[in-house]
Amino acid sequence: MTTLGVIGLGRIGAFHTETLSGIEGVDGLVVADERPDVVAAVAAKHGAKPADSVEELLASGVDGVVVSAATPAHAELTLAAVHRGLPTFCEKPIAATAAESAKVAEVIARSGVPVQVGYQRRFDAAFAAAKRAVDDGSLGLLHTVRSTTMDPAPPPMEYIAGSGGIFRDCAVHDFDVLRWITAFSATASNPATRTCPSLSIRSVAPIRKLQAEVSALRDLSRNMRGPSGHVRIFMRAECNACRSGADNAVREQWQPICNATRLGVVRRTNE
């Protein structure tokens, strides 16, 4: 018998509850939120046990915990579960600042309790294919990585107010997967942001000098039609003209070498 607790029943918490309720091997759910009416509605819909508080949920005998509350509460709730020895899945980010994240990570490491942060793109088949292409060298010399994330509409204002902003709340997925695929850490960045009255936020953040001449470009929006996220990886052809800097002498053509749900990996060939 496996029973899991879900803390926080907003947009993503309700989604996780629905998903878990349909997974074979999950025998029961306990749910908690600061809004009693939401707890009652979600519990009734998915056959979960309602808890009046986080403390009640943690003491209810659950085998693991999903933390999907608002961003400012992630660190405290995750550590509360860890202190009880409960394996925990925490929505990203694990904390509001880098310093706090480091402290939380240190406590988790000492505890030995399994904790996973919700960077699900590492488990997406398309992103995994991109990483394999980089790791095994089949893509060629890595030159430019471009990552694009587009939400179809802005989230509610009450969510935005406590989310930490579009970089902490949304772009962290791209920062994580870029580092995971390339194995490089950014040494410099130059973000530029444009905010529109309709809450359409589009920002571009070139990250320079991942290694040598490798660069990354981030592009995200909360009010655009498009895929929820994709990464395009380009290679620079190895040829005498390229090495000498005479790129204009080379006729370029971009060809797809991997296409999947949210990913395009392309290679440049010379004719």
Image (cartoon, rainbow, N blue to C red):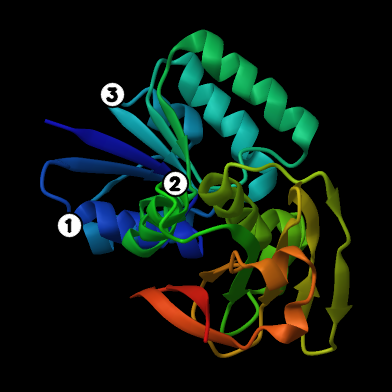
Q: Which residue is mark 3?
A: 61
Q: Which residue is mark 1?
A: 22
- The single residue placed furthest to the front in the displayed view is 240
Q: Secondary structure at mark 1?
A: loop
Badge 2 amino acid: Asp
Q: Name the image quarter holding residue 5.
A: top left
Q: Which residue is mark 2?
A: 135
Mark 3 or 1, nearer chain start: 1
Residue at the image position 70 percent from the left and 21 percent from the top: 103
Badge 3 amino acid: Gly
Foreground disc of the pair 3, 1: 1
Q: Secondary structure at mark 3?
A: loop
Which residue occupies the foreground of this view, 231 or 251? 251
Placement of the N terminus among the 4 image quadrants: top left
Q: In the shown orientation, is residue 188 left or right of residue 75?
A: right
* Residue 7: image location, x then y, percent: 46, 43
